Image (tube, rainbow, N blue to C red):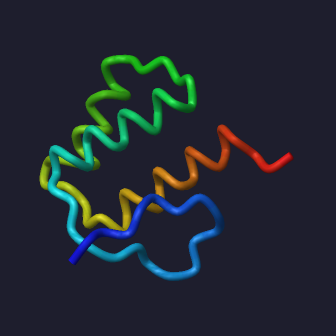
Amino acid sequence: MTPDPVPMGPVHTAPRGFVSGPDQHQQMLAVLADASLDLGDYDHRIVGWLTRSPGQDWSTVATIASWIQRAANPPT
């Protein structure tokens, strides 16, 4: 199954699919970078916890990434 992309609007149902921990990690770092956030060591640790050890399901990570994207790019 192809995973649903990170939602760009309000999330009404859980995003579907499987994204590996390393891919979740890279996607979350990309979303944070796109939001122009400077990350500290502890920030990186938490991204690692969220995505790699043991990692959350894709629906959780995609929803959190969606919040970050929407907060950084509010509708005009």
**68 sits to left or right of 42:** right
Residue at the far bottom: name it: 13
Q: Residue 63: x and y, percent?
A: 47, 62
Q: Residue 12: x and y, percent?
A: 58, 80
Viewer-proximal residue, 51 or 73?
73
Residue 1 drawn above or below residue 71? below
**Residue at left offset 56%, top offset 45%:** 68
**12 sits to left or right of 48:** right
For the image, the number of numbered tags is 0
Q: Quadrant of residue 54?
A: bottom left
Viewer-proximal residue, 2 or 42?
2
Residue at the far front: name it: 2
Residue 1 drawn above or below residue 59? below
**40 sits to left or right of 12:** left
Q: Residue 22: x and y, percent?
A: 16, 44
Q: Quadrant of residue 4?
A: bottom left
**18 sits to left or right of 64:** left
Viewer-proximal residue, 41 or 57?
57
Q: Residue 1: x and y, percent?
A: 21, 78
**Residue at left offset 53%, top offset 24%:** 37
Residue 56 drawn above or below residue 30? below
**Residue at left offset 40%, top offset 73%:** 15
